[in-house]
Amino acid sequence: MRRARGFLFLLVALACAGAWAQAPYPSRPVRMLVTFPPGGSTDLIARIISAPLAERLGKPVLVENRPGASGAIAAEVVAKSPPDGHTLLVAPTSSVMGLNPLLIPNLPYDPKDFAFITLLVTSPFLVAVSPAAMPGVNTLPQLIAAIKQKGTSVPFGSGGYLSGMHLAGELFKSLTGLNMTHVPYKGNGPALSDLAGGQIPIAFVDLGSTGPFVKSGRIKIVALAIKQRSALAPDLPTAAELGLPGWEAVGSFGLVTPVGTPQEVIRRLNTEVTAILRLPDVRERILATGNEPAPGTPEEHAAFTAHEVAKWTKVFKDAGLKPEQ
C-alpha cells in the first residue's frame, strides 16, 4: 500500500510539473526596461508599443526606466532575470551590444546574455553646417571642398564623446581624409544651438533633433548617413547619392530578452511586436519621434547588430579613441 501511495504521489507530481512547464505565456505582467529616463524618444517608443502589446498578450506590459552607465544598469537587470520572456530590454544597439565592453571595466553583463526579438526603430545620423560659419556651403561636395581649403583642422560638434553621432563624425573623417577635430557637447540640443549661432561650423547629429533649427534656416542639412532616402525626410539627399558611399550611420534600438528564453516565446513576441510596428497609427506616432519602424525577424535583428558592433568597434579602434576623455 505504501509503495502504491508513493507511486501515486510521483504521478501527481509529474503531472503538476508538466502542467507548470506548459503554462501559457505570459503567466504574469511583462516588464519592459528602457535605458533612458522618461520623456525621450526611446521611452516614448516603448510606451507606444507597450499598450497594444499588453492587449495582444492579455497581460500588463510595464515600462520601467533604468537609465545610467550607457544602458548597463538596465542591461544587467534583464541579463540576470529568468529566461522566460517576462523581462524585456529596449536596447541601444551600439552601446549595450557593442561599445560598453570596450568602455566599462568589469561590465556586469555580457552581450551574449541576450536573445534577439526584433529591431524596433532606426534613425539616420546626418551632417549639418552653420550658414553663419560656412556661407555658401549647401551640399556635401561643397562642404568637403570647403574643409580641404581651410588648411587647418576644422571643429565638428556632436551630442557627446563616444555618442553615435561622434562615431559617425569619426567615420566621416576616415572616409574623406579630412582634418577635423571633435568638440563634444552634453546632448544634441547644445551642439545644435552652437551650430545655429556659428560657434561651430559643422555638427553630426540625428535627424529627430534638427527640426526647429532647419525650419528657422539657422542650420543646413547637407547629407543623411544612409543608403536610401528616409521616410522621415524624403527630400534630403543621402551621402551615397552625393558621392560618399560607405558613410552609413544610424541610431537603432531593438528588443531583447535573456538568452535561454524558449523559442516559442521569442517567436510569439516577434510576431506580436512586428505586427504592432506595422500598424499605420503606430508607424505615424513613431515617425513623429524622429525614428522609423524597422520590424524584422530575430535572425535579421542578430545580423544587423553583429554588423553594427563590428563597424563601430573598428571606428573606435582606428580613431584611437579611449574610454574617457
Image (cartoon, rainbow, N blue to C red):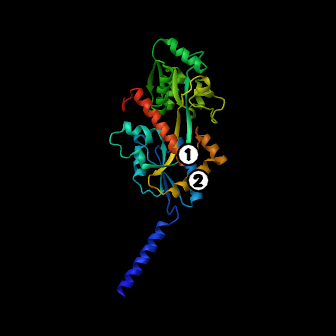
Question: Under tag 2, what secondary structure?
Answer: helix
Image quarter where the N terminus lies is bottom left
Going by the numbered disc 2, the residue's amino acid type is Thr
The mark lying in front, picked from 1 and 2, is: 2
Q: Residue at x 46, y 44 (%)?
A: 35
Label 1 vs 2, first from the N-terminus: 1
Q: Is residue 248 above or below residue 45?
A: above
Question: What residue is rendered at 38% in x and 39% in y?
Answer: 101
**Mark 1–mark 2 distance (CA, rounded to whole Å):** 18 Å
Furthest residue in direction bottom, as rendered: 1
Q: Nearer the viewer, residue 206 or 23?
A: 23
- Residue, disc 2: 271
Q: Residue at x 41, y 27 (%)?
A: 318
Pick whichever, 222 or 109, lies toward us.
109
Q: Which residue is mark 1?
A: 45
Residue 48 locus on image (x, y percent) = 58, 48
Question: Whole-percent x and y of residue 73?
Answer: 40, 46
* Residue 129 in the image, given as x and y percentages of width and height: 55, 22
Tally of numbered tags: 2
Extreme-left residue of the structure: 106
Binning the other alpha carbons within 10 Å of mark 2 as few (below 14), some (14 to 19) or many (20 upward) gives some
